[in-house]
Each structure stands twice: as structure tokens, then as C-alpha cells.
Image: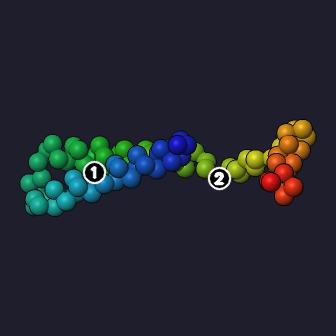
């Protein structure tokens, strides 16, 4: 798994936790949300912001390296011979 994919997965998990915490906080009136819940909400929001900024800095748009036999003429010829209809039997 690439760093980008790992960050995306972590962000998704943190967003799910944040959503759960927000649902818990929604059961209270604005002035009666317990302190521990407010602290957890703030921490998760900061974590989401941090992960989003890290995702922006990690690029996942690099071209995929092609599987090309460069400088491997002998190996390439063996592959082509094996794949030719005459060699299949």
C-alpha cells in the first residue's frame, strides 16, 4: 500500500470516528456537551485537518512504470519463442 493510500484509509477511519462523536454530541443541548466529548471532537477535527494537508503534499499522480524489457534481448527472445504457436505443441 502506498503512503497516499495509507493516508486516505486513515483519513476515512478518522472521519468515521468524528461522525460518531458528532452524533453523540448532537444528543446534548449546545451548552451541555460533556467536556471529554468536546475534547475528543476537537482532537479528531485537528487530526482530519492534519491528514488532509498531508494528503495534499503526497502525490499519487506519478506515472506507472511500464513493464518493458529494456536491454534484455535474450529474455525477450525466450518469451517470444515460448509464446509462438509453433512452440505450444
Residue placed farthest to the front in the image?
Answer: 89
Which labelled disc corresponds to residue 36? none
Give the residue number, with chain letter if any, for mark 1: 17
- Could you tell me residue 85's position as x and y percent? 84, 58
| Vertical relation: 74 (above or below) 45 | above
Question: Is residue 14 at least partly visible in the picture?
Answer: yes
Q: For the residue carrying disc 2, how many other residues have a C-alpha within 10 Å: few (<14), some (14-19), or many (20+)? A: few
- Could you tell me residue 13's position as x and y percent? 35, 50
Name the colouring of the figure: rainbow
**Residue 46, image quadrant:** top left
Count of number-bearing discs: 2
Dividing the image into 4 quarters, which one contains the C terminus?
Answer: bottom right
Asked if the residues shown at circle 1 and circle 2 are in contact, with their CB atoms under 8 angstroms apart, the answer is: no
Between 84 and 29, the one nearer to me in the picture:
84
- Kind of element beneath mark 1: helix
- Kind of element beneath mark 2: loop
The residue drawn where x is 87% and y is 48% is 81
**Residue 74, image quadrant:** top right
The residue drawn where x is 11% and y is 61% is 27
Answer left or right for 12 relative to 21. right
Q: For the residue carrying disc 1, how many other residues have a C-alpha within 10 Å: few (<14), some (14-19), or many (20+)? A: some
Answer left or right for 63 relative to 10. right
The residue drawn where x is 87% and y is 55% is 86
| Cα separation between marks 1 and 2 | 28 Å
Question: Is residue 70 at least partly visible in the picture?
Answer: no
Answer left or right for 72 relative to 21. right
Between 46 and 2, the one nearer to me in the picture:
2
- Could you tell me residue 41's position as x and y percent? 25, 49
Answer left or right for 1 relative to 13. right
Give the residue number, with chain letter if any, for mark 2: 61
Indicate which disc, 1 or 2, sits on the residue closer to the N terminus.
1
The residue drawn where x is 61% and y is 48% is 59
Amino acid at each position: 500500500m502506498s503512503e497516499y493510500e495509507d493516508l486516505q484509509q486513515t483519513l476515512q477511519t478518522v472521519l468515521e470516528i468524528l461522525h460518531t462523536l458528532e452524533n453523540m454530541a448532537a444528543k446534548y443541548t449546545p451548552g451541555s456537551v460533556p467536556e471529554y466529548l468536546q475534547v475528543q471532537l476537537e482532537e479528531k477535527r485537528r487530526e482530519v485537518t492534519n491528514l488532509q494537508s498531508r494528503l495534499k503534499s503526497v502525490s499519487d499522480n506519478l506515472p506507472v512504470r511500464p513493464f518493458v524489457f529494456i536491454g534484455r534481448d535474450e529474455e525477450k527472445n525466450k518469451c517470444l519463442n515460448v509464446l509462438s504457436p509453433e512452440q505450444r505443441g
